[in-house]
Image: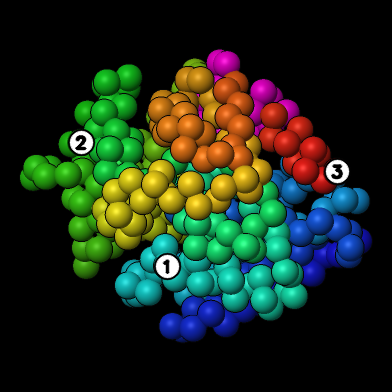
Amino acid sequence: MINESGMLDVGDGNHVHWEVHGAPGGKPAVVVHGGPGSGASPGWLRFFDLEKYRVVLFDQRGCGRSTPDAADHDTDLSVNTTLHLIADMELLREHLGIDRWMLFGGSWGTTLGLAYAIRHPDRVTEIVMSGVATTTRWEVEWITEGVGHYFPREWERFRDGAPGGGRLVDAYARLLADPDPAVREKAARDWCDWEDSHVRVRADQEPDPRYTDPRFRMRFARLVTHYWSNHAWLEDGEILAGVEKLGDVPGVLVHGRIDLSSPLRTAWELSRAWPGCELVIVEEAGHSGGQPGMRDALKAAVERFAR
């Protein structure tokens, strides 16, 4: 079994942390993690039979193990964009000697994974994604404003954390760039409290333990607001229009019926525009791919493609 890791110089002063796990001759797959800013934890490996797959994990630029760390106030985010991340994926693929690979991930990873696939369809064997999102203007406004209708108390706290009017995502991006560390820390905490509110749609779901770490909070909040305030540097609707180029590249989109963070509408529209796509709707599931019904559907798709 392979268990390798390293750091790849991708330019602009950035180094990307990568790992490879599984069978030496296994089917190549790359995990495109969410966030932006979450990082690729070993937990992603539970979706794969490592006797059949060779799984690549990598932390996108700024995500802790990749350096410099976006948790640091002086880390330059101007060289951290969707096009930079797509180029990093190609460099990593070449560095590892992989000709074609399966894309697996979710949430923000859907945006990045599909943006990569649309530009490099000849390098993609299949695509499996959950908690589907494409970072359109409507989606950003929904997740920072509209979904507040379901969580009014939590949303009012979120809104009050960034007074002054205008779009909340832009206001928080400014606060997270403030020279005062106390202002930045409060903004990061308020942002992550809101994130945890709308992703956890059930009262019995435990809070995300990562948000107790001040550096994770800062990294996550800086990168999410950086990407969302710029709509991922994509034309509105670019991914929806672009999936036609994927043709018969097989894809499975797994989405929870009660995903309030990323409403089903986006996954539905993508599935209708992409000829090779299958949409699996999991009843009574929310955004997380780790929920039982979501996990089972994702593992079934991965197992099918292994054959």
The answer to which quarter of the image holds residue 248 is: top right
Q: Which mark is residue 119?
A: none
What residue is disc 3 on?
307
Q: CA distance from mark 3 to mark 2?
A: 49 Å
On the picture, is 208 further left or further right than 249? left
In the depicted view, which residue is nearer to us: 287 or 52?
52
Q: Which mark is residue 83?
A: 1
Magenta region: which residues?
Answer: 283-296
Q: Earlier in the sequence, mark 1 or mark 2?
A: 1
User: Residue 265: horizontal and vertical position, in percent?
Assistant: 41, 28
Nearest to the eye among marks 3 and 2: give it.
3
The amino acid at mark 1 is Leu
Indicate whether 119 appears above or below 14: above
Is any part of residue 278 visible from this angle? yes
Q: Earlier in the sequence, mark 3 or mark 2?
A: 2
Mark 3, Cα crowd under 10 Å, few <14 / some 14-19 / many 20+, is few
Cβ atoms at labels 1 and 2 below 8 Å apart: no
Q: Residue at x 51, y 20 (%)?
A: 257
Q: Earlier in the sequence, mark 1 or mark 3?
A: 1
What residue is disc 2 on?
159
**How many numbered discs sit on the rendered protein?**
3
User: Residue 156: horizontal and vertical position, in percent?
Assistant: 22, 29
Q: CA distance from mark 1 to mark 2?
A: 31 Å
Mark 1, Cα crowd under 10 Å, few <14 / some 14-19 / many 20+, is some
User: Residue 307: horizontal and vertical position, in percent?
Assistant: 85, 43
Nearest to the eye among marks 1 and 3: give it.
3
Q: Residue at x 39, y 66 (%)?
A: 81
